[in-house]
Amino acid sequence: MSNLDEFLAGERLDDVVFYLSDEYLDDDSRLREVGTETAGGVRLILDGETGRSAFQAGTGMGAMEFAKTAMGADGEIARSLDDGACPFADDGDADDHAIRFVFAFAEAQNEEVGGLYAEGDVVHAYAHCTCGESYSHKWVIGDRDD
């Protein structure tokens, strides 16, 4: 099982996922050496503290500040955490909307909180689009198979 599969199965609750698109990431970036190349960029799965530091180094933003900003808009982020559908895209300008980067973490089930959190472990994913907007998507682990 890959690190991503383990993360998506709820087996890496202390880790974060950080994805950077090829367009956003320099060709000679050190992150390419430590991450996994995907069709459109590089995905890193790191322990929480290291991941937040890598996110800040790679984007210039604090991870949690970015997450707070992105929470303002619900969108769709691929289960693979390397693609998404920007909620700010109109049908005519979809070409102007592509993922620049994604930050994600998983939170353990918490029945006391209720709602989604009572159903199981929850993935929180936050994306930044080439249009300059950010958005979020969260789901219960095991509810998606796409």
Image (cartoon, rainbow, N blue to C red):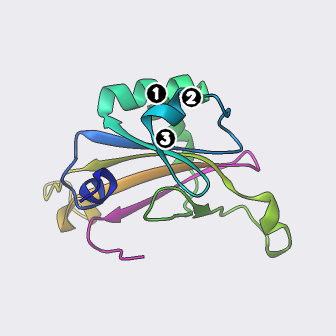
SS state under label 3: helix
Q: Nearer the viewer, residue 33 or 139?
A: 33
- Answer whether labels 1 and 2 touch (C-beta < 8 Å): yes
Q: Which residue lies furthest to the left in this view?
A: 111
Which quadrant of the figure contains the C terminus?
A: bottom left
Instruction: Return the x and y of residue 110 as percentages of the image width and height.
Output: 16, 54
Q: Residue at x 28, y 53 (%)?
A: 7
How far apart marks 2 and 3 lie (CA) works out to 15 Å
- Mark 3 against mark 1, which lies toward the viewer? 1
Q: Is residue 141 above or below residue 105?
A: below
Image coordinates for residue 122, horizontal then vertical, percent? 29, 58
Residue most extreme to the right: 92
List the residue tagged with mark 1.
Answer: 54
Q: Measuring 44% from the left and 61% from the top, which residue is drawn there?
A: 80
Image check: 86 left or right of 71?
Answer: right
Tell me the distance, in whole angstroms, between the alpha carbons under discs 1 and 2. Answer: 6 Å
- Give the amino acid at mark 3: Ala
Q: Mark 2 points at which residue?
A: 58
Say what amino acid the circle numbered 1 marks: Ala
Marks 2 and 3: which is nearer the front? 2
Identify residue type, mark 2.
Answer: Gly
